[in-house]
Image (cartoon, grey):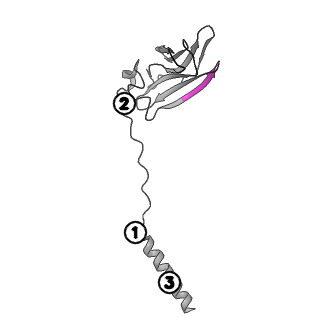
Amino acid sequence: MNARRSALATATGLLVLSTAGWAPAAPAAPAPKALVTCEGASCDGADPNQTGCASGRATTLESKSYLGKGIRLRYNPDCRAAWAQLTEGKSGDDALVQDDQGLTYHRPISSGTDTYSPMVSNKDPRKARACVTVPGSGQSCTGYH
């Protein structure tokens, strides 16, 4: 029994020594704010890529499909602005963003299959929606967010 107790005491001592300097990892720091060049109303009509709003914490509030085209309402809380992103379109298809006050910006596809609109500020109580307009076929929009 003494040999068994001695071995157990040695193992316990080694375990205590090996964990004595151990501390749990510090929690990860929150993601830093993106470097953006506009906020709120100063983003109205601005390009989300050129202002840094399309990166960082940019997120999709709603996406939908219309005639095989994808339309997304994109938003960045650091910019407090929203824009429309159109994918799988063709020349002439139009990405449009509109706030609930009627302020509207759009950008048609001139080449390729994707485009995005300029931004509208989306600070409470203002809300925004994204639309795709397909010439000769109509328009489809997300809800206001």
What is the three-letter code of the residue carrying label 1?
Gly
Residue where numbered disc 1 is placed: 21
> Residue 62 occupies which quadrant of the picture?
top right
Q: Secondary structure at mark 3?
A: helix
Disc 3 from disc 2: Cα separation: 60 Å
Image location (x, y in percent) of residue 27: 44, 53
Q: Could you say whether the residue bearing mark 2 is in a helix, strand or loop?
A: loop
Please, is residue 28 above or below residue 100 in the view? below
Q: Is residue 145 visible?
A: no
Q: Earlier in the sequence, mark 2 or mark 1?
A: 1
- From the image, give the main secondary structure of the stretch colored magenta: strand
Residue beneath disc 2: 36
Q: Which residue is mark 3?
A: 9
Q: Quadrant of the N terminus?
A: bottom right
Residue 49 visible, this orientation? yes
Q: What type is the residue that disc 2 sits on?
A: Val
Bin the neighbour count of mark 3 within 10 Å (Cα to Cα): few under 14, some 14-19, many 20 and up.
few
Residue located farthest toward the front when viewing the structure as drawn: 112
Which residue is farthest right?
Answer: 67
| Residue found at x 40% / y 19% | 44
Q: Residue furthest bottom?
A: 2
Q: Earlier in the sequence, mark 1 or mark 3?
A: 3
Distance CA(mark 1)–CA(mark 3): 20 Å
The total of numbered circles placed on residues is: 3
The circle on residue 2 is none
The region drawn magenta spans 61-69
Residue 62 in magenta stretch: yes
Image check: 93 left or right of 121?
A: right
Residue type, numbered disc 3: Ala
Q: Residue 77's x, y, as percent? A: 44, 32
